[in-house]
Amino acid sequence: MTLEALLNAVEGHFPSVVAALIEPTAAPDQGTADSDAIDFELVDRNCRSVYAAQVKSGGSGKELSAPDAFGILLRMIRARPQAQSYRLITNIRLHPKAVQLNRVLDIDDSPELRRRLGQLLARSRWWDEPAEMSDDELTRMRRARISVDSRQRHQLRDQLRERMRRFRNEHRSGLGHEAAGRLTNYLAFEIHRRASGEGKGQFGLAEFREELLTPGRHLAYDLGEFDWGIMVGPVPAPPDIPRPDLIESIRTVLASGGREREVRTCALLGPSGIGKTSTAADFAHDNADSYDHIFWVNGESGASLRASFQSIHDWLLRRTDEIPEPDSSRLRDRVRALLSSSARPWLMVFDNVVDRRIVDPWVPTSGRGHVLITSTNQVSWATHHAKVAVQNMTARQATQLIRMRLHQGDGWDAASERTAAALAEQLDYWPLAMELACGHLAGHEFGLSEAGRYLEQIRDLALNDREAIPYGYPETLVGAIRLALGRLMNNEELQPASRGAAHALFPAAYFASRQIPIWLLYFSTLMSSDNAVRSGLRHPAVLSPRVKVPFTAYEMHRALRAESLAQRDEPLCTLPEQAWSTAHCEGIDDTINVNEIVQHVIRTLAEDRTDVPEILSRAAYHVQGWLTAFIEANDDAHLLAILPHVQSLADHAGRLGITTDTLAVMWGNLAGTYVLRGKLDDAREAFENELEYLLARKEPAPVLELKTRTQLADVLKNTGESPAVWLDHLDRARDLAFQLADARPEDVSVAVANCLTVLHNHTGDGAVEPAVQSLTRDFELLRERMPSTGALAIQHEISQINKALTTGCMTDKEVEQRCRALLEDDGLRGAQRLELTGFLTEALTYQHRWNDALERLETIHEHSVERPLYPHVIAKVLHNVGLRVGLAVASGVPECRTALMILVGEADASPAPECRQLLSLLVAIASRMAVQHLSLQAGMTCMPFKMQTLRLLEAVCDRGHDAIREVYKGLADLDSAALDRDDEFGWRLLSQVAIASAVSIALRDA
């Protein structure tokens, strides 16, 4: 209470107060020597009491009577006769007569006050005191009040912390959650120290204020780190020229209206190069003391959103000790839930949002946070209620920017200022245009004096190509970009790096605008696919400093930065060296970004030429090489980081209707990535695009067609297409395989193995069974003719194990031995290792070796936690292992055992305790998977219903009535029609047993 009173005073609620006296032993005025009457008081510069308080605490159930309250107040007014106010503060519930006493103290008339006090206290030990009180004492009593404070201690501390945070933020000092707690404890200690008599119990307001505003670096040193203003993600540096008008507009929007825990969102809208990102960064830095965390999200694409949220999740993981979430939708929901539950204020910036529909599901809606969104798409955000238009700089800001960029030494005079102002005006006060102009003039011998000539040049260039000027952009900006490009092409001093930088802008224009790997851009500019193949280039390629080249990637980068056409960006990934994959080498994480308007202008220039297919093909060759390398190295972090560039190239190729062999291969690799991530609809579209190009090609490409049809057939089967559709592709693949068998045996061997895998996984359909058998027979005959490799042998062995588990043609022990032998091979691909681990788990459960199975299932669980790939493999494990474990667990639950006896007349012996742990782990894995990922394997029907059945069985085991009701209710909305099939007997039985047991428990305990 003393700390709260000091805060009231320092906030100005008691203007005359200069200090607090804590547990005063002597009265500052002419009062009685009653040292226990006052707990603390606030005094003015003459040591007169302004506010005297007594704090009385008690446990729940107690009541404070009117006589007891009166007695305390009487002691207070006699101990401090000159005090301006008296306050009895208590957490004890007031007796109705004590409440009445508080109202009586409002009476202004002394005789009436005396009479009413006498009535209230008539039967108490204070019955005669009102009559004997002097008029002066009655006057003082009217300045007394009883305050009931029912807050719990933790609530009081939280409110004090929040008030201290607010006070420090108003004074730009900042305070995080932990620092607020530390500061609260320290100030409380200072109060207790004075209560023990140090400093005569006095805590001066100036000293309190100084302690309250302790410099942040001192608090951080005490804590070991700052716990406020922590920036997570690639937050850009604040701009050199602040724009306070925009910052204030954002602050006003975010501070206005809304419910307490409703996240307020402000959209910063404007053309490219106008300063949206720098304004958002300026706001983040300027208000860093108001937020514990500032999260920066790349909103350019779905892949970049996911990568950013994974980084945020990883950071919050260190704060909450939760398990990371690999699935996009669950990752998004998990981060939103963590932010919603956080007591700490945060800011999230979604930068460079292209499509509102993509970003909307990711935006948090609940919590103590604010959201900033930057976007050039003003139409998309037209209906958003809170937006700030980022427009041209003011004349003063623009002139200041030019002065900062070009002022060197003492040569700046009034004439320079006028020239800078005129240049800024001609450039429409457009930030990017002025940066480009300054980049040009800074490298010119005569500097600013060349401004007139510079303006003539950029106007001429813009007039020569007015179609390149997007709507809403000044022609001078487009001219400035073209002139900067021209300077790079003709820069004699930096040749050949500057010419290489100019050419690099063309592939850069078709990549995503952010985090373009420098070395990817370097090779996309300089090395054709033919040269790369001849030189044996391995992706991702980075040249050693010892290799002699006309210019390096970093020299190319410096040339782009010198003309303000690119900026250094955050690393592609920030993995510690010990976590690097085999595809990771020094330098691959160095990136740049290119402004969208620069990309647009460069694309406009490029698309007037005839070499755009070559530009796209060269970039596609190298980017798909990076993608493939990361897939083969199981490097998911880099795979996800590079994916936006692959998608961007594919989108532009589709927009322009450009198709080449290299682009077709890129479509195939992109589709393969989608398959790994469980995005089968996207994979189907990419494979169909690739196949469409191959079929339209003047010269047939049978090898590529064979690969594409094989993979497309698998995707079509797993997306639920009728067998007739995907069998048509396998039928054509068979013809191609026989055609190529002698000329391309290795390619045919791989394709045949893949086709047989698709066919062996087919669950059966009477109408098409003859066609399946015929194709299988033909492919098996062809396989016998083809050469075998180690990789194909492994694939065949995996196929045989899968077949054995389905048909029982091997013993469970033999399956186990084969799986263990294959898992010893370090050359297994990620999907193969995961699939074999699943087969081994399945074989162990059939042998009732629950502890061994649990060990293997934990490995699969770790994969599902750490990596977002191969959800189809995990779903298959859940399906097959889940049935075996579910039936075994049910045998050990009395209600389930009874149901089994009724339904089938028998039940297995009760399993070991580890079997129950297996069930819980299966449920945990299933709960982390998106619903659409549970059904990625053809033939695995009703997967959401089956996984809900496992959850119900777990609830039955725990006998949790609320959980049983909740899970049972969830079953009603899930499809279970396919369980009537003969091949679904096991799952049908398990679901019937679980449901019957749940109903039995609910009825018995009702």
Image: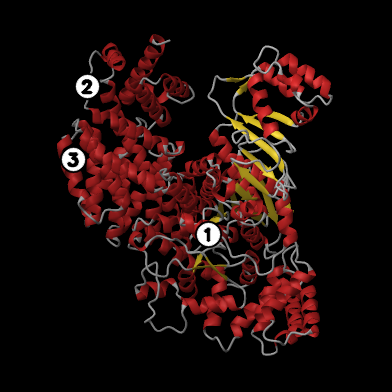
Residue 395 is tagged as none
Q: Earlier in the sequence, mark 2 or mark 1?
A: 1
Relative to 337, residue 479 above or below: below
Q: Label 3 sits on what residue type?
A: Glu
Figure label count: 3
- Residue on which disc 2 sits: 910
Corner quadrant of residue 428: bottom right
Assess disc 1: are there few (<14), some (14-19) or many (≥20) residues with their C-alpha within 10 Å of its C-alpha: few
**Screen quadrant of the C terminus:** top left
Position of residue 712 in the picture relative to residue 905 (left or right): right
Position of residue 722 in the picture relative to residue 36 (left or right): left
Relative to 414, residue 72 above or below: above
Contact, mark 3 vs mark 1 (Cβ under 8 Å) = no
Q: Residue 435, can we see it?
A: yes
**Screen quadrant of the N terminus:** top right
Q: Label 2 sits on what residue type?
A: Ser
- Residue on which disc 3 sits: 816
Q: Earlier in the sequence, mark 2 or mark 3?
A: 3
Relative to 130, residue 871 above or below: below
Q: Position of residue 493 (x, y in %)?
A: 57, 89
- Residue on which disc 1 sits: 218
Comparing 13 with 593, the one in front is 13
Secondary element under disc 3, as helix, strand or loop, is: helix
Comparing 841 with 176, the one in front is 176
Residue at left offset 29%, top offset 41%? 858
